[in-house]
Amino acid sequence: MLALAATPALAKSSGTILLQERCATCHDLKGPAAVTLSALRMRKGPDLFYAGNKYRAGWLVRWLEKPTRIRPAGMFYLDHIKPGPKRDVIDTTTLTPHLALNAGDAVSAAEALMGLKANGKLLGTKPFIPGPSPMGEMTFDKFYGCTACHEIEPEFGGLSGPEVYTAGRRLTPEFMLSFIRDPQAWNPKGLMPNKHVPEANIPKLVNFLIELAKKDWK
Ligand code: HEC
Ligand code: HEC
């Protein structure tokens, strides 16, 4: 047994060990996603067990070295807001910065994360071919009301969902397409509603997010 455990093919990669030791307390690395609201409330960070089907690898490395806030009001909006003069505002004193990794650890953690490939069937087999997004912002904002929960530029848009002006840098187009089509297929109790966007309009939204991410944000 000892000899077996020592064979390199069976040994866990340093990235996998790092994930288990430093990330698993807050992130689910194995799945499945929470199926009750109380289980969802226990989540201290976003699920990562399908990371390899969600993120752009290069972004992961850069972000793990220099993390920035993605959800303006943290994991659970209601935990981090306080009443303001006109509307609720974020109580930033309740938000803590994400841990940062050194360059080498960021590469090995990203490598191990890219190996976590649950839910692949939801992505289909066709690669997404980006194109222009005429009326993209109008579709996002006015037709489907997505701006109610998502910032489409810093300080503009809702605060309960992740900022989306950087989504095109962080996420693969195939993931965005699939997530917009059916958010609950990825996260059954997740707080994004299924807006039943007609199939023909989903690529418009994805193209809008891809174009948006090319602007010179932070
Ligand atoms: C104390 C809890 C905690 C620990 C430990 C932690 N994270 Fe996180 N992580 C979070 C929270 C909370 C967020 C959401 C941050 C945001 O949206 O601004 C997050 C976000 C992320 C994201 C972006 C996810 C997304 O889709 O928005 C990645 C990738 C990530 N963490 C990877 C890691 C890795 C790798 C480790 C271990 C080296 C780690 N985290 C350790 C709490 C944690
Ligand atoms: C009621 C608030 C709400 C509305 C309305 C909403 N979303 Fe979301 N959205 C969320 C939340 C919360 C998440 C994070 C969900 C999760 O991880 O399960 C999310 C996640 C996303 C993601 C993945 C982002 C990431 O960083 O992981 C995309 C892309 C997205 N939404 C696009 C849209 C589009 C397009 C619309 C309109 C058709 C929309 N959203 C409407 C709340 C909302």
Image: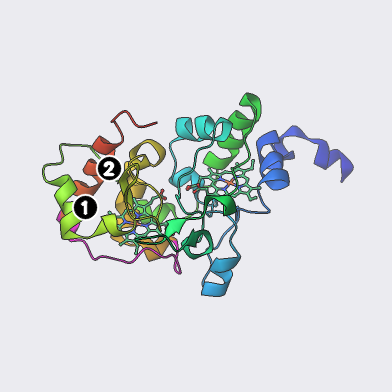
Going by the image, does 124 lie left or right of 6?
A: left
Going by the image, does 105 lie left or right of 76?
A: right
Question: From the Cβ of disc 2, is ligand 2 less than 8 Å away?
Answer: yes
Image label count: 2
Q: Is residue 192 magenta?
A: yes
Give the residues in magenta: 187-200
Q: Secondary structure at mark 1?
A: helix
Residue 211: x, y in percent?
24, 36
Q: Which residue is mark 1?
A: 140
Question: Closer to the N terminus: mark 1 or mark 2?
Answer: 1
Q: Amino acid at mark 2?
A: Leu
Mark seen at residue 209: 2
Q: Which residue shows up at 34% across the image and 61% down it?
A: 86
Cα separation, mark 1 vs mark 2, equals 9 Å
Tag 1 and tag 2, C-beta contact below 8 Å: yes
Residue 83: x, y in percent?
44, 64
Question: From the Cβ of disc 1, is ligand 2 less than 8 Å away?
Answer: yes
Q: Is residue 29 above or below residue 130?
A: below
Q: Nearer the viewer, residue 59 or 126?
A: 59
Q: Is residue 36 visible?
A: no
Q: Which quarter of the rendered image does ligand 2 occupy?
A: bottom left
- The overriding secondary structure of the stretch rendered in magenta is loop
